[in-house]
Amino acid sequence: MPIMTIAKSGFLFILAGLLEIGGGYLVWQWWRNGAGWAFAAGGGIVLFLYGIIPTYQPEHFGRVYAAYGGWFVVLSLLWGWGFDGNVPDRFDIIGGLICLIGVGIIMYWPR
């Protein structure tokens, strides 16, 4: 797979992750922490946009969503660190690296 295709795919995974986690975070703030309805509505819109982004990936649905799971794990840990101050420990980092290795095998390994 050409490097530009891999770079574009990685960008799409990161964008999808930010939208999914960001939308979920807005809904979390509304439901769990009593934020206003605008948080819920904004979260719903952002989650809808998240659903569109993976359609631009070069692979089929099952492979894209399987590989996306690895990105989701890493981005969730980073989100928790950046927004809630929960610093990943060494086991989070090791687990995240294992997930990204899995992404590389599932999504980009030559077939």
Image: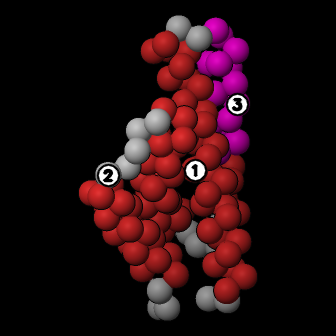
What residue sits 42% from the left and 80% below the top? 105
Q: Are marks 2 and 1 in contact (CB under 8 Å)?
A: no
What residue sits 48% from the left and 32% below the top? 84
Q: Are marks 2 and 3 in contact (CB under 8 Å)?
A: no
| Image quarter of the N terminus | bottom right
Q: Residue 52: image x %, image y %? A: 69, 49
Question: Which of pointers 2 and 3 indicates the residue nearer the eye?
Answer: 2
Most extreme residue toward the left is 91
What residue sits 62% from the left and 51% below the top? 16
Disc 1 marks a residue whose amino acid type is: Gly
Q: Residues within 10 Å of mark 3 (few under 14, many from 20)?
A: few
The disc placed on residue 17 is 1
Q: Residues within 10 Å of mark 2 (few under 14, many from 20)?
A: few
Residue extent of the magenta highlight: 36-51
Front residue of 59 and 90: 90
For the residues marked 1 and 3, what is the alpha-carbon distance in whole angstroms?
14 Å
What residue sits 49% from the left and 59% below the top? 71
Q: Is residue 103 left or right of residue 51?
A: left
For the residues marked 2 and 1, what is the alpha-carbon distance in whole angstroms?
21 Å
Q: Main secondary structure of the magenta part?
A: helix
Tell me: residue 23, above or below residue 105: above
Question: Which of pointers 1 and 3 indicates the residue nearer the eye?
Answer: 1
Q: Residues within 10 Å of mark 1 (few under 14, many from 20)?
A: many
Q: Please, what secondary structure does the residue beneath circle 3 have?
A: helix
Disc 3 marks a residue whose amino acid type is: Ile
Q: Residue 25: image x %, image y %? A: 54, 30
Q: Quadrant of residue 35?
A: top right
For disc 2, the marked residue is 89
Q: Please, what secondary structure does the residue beneath circle 1 have?
A: helix
For disc 3, the marked residue is 45
Residue 37 within the magenta-colored segment of the rendering: yes
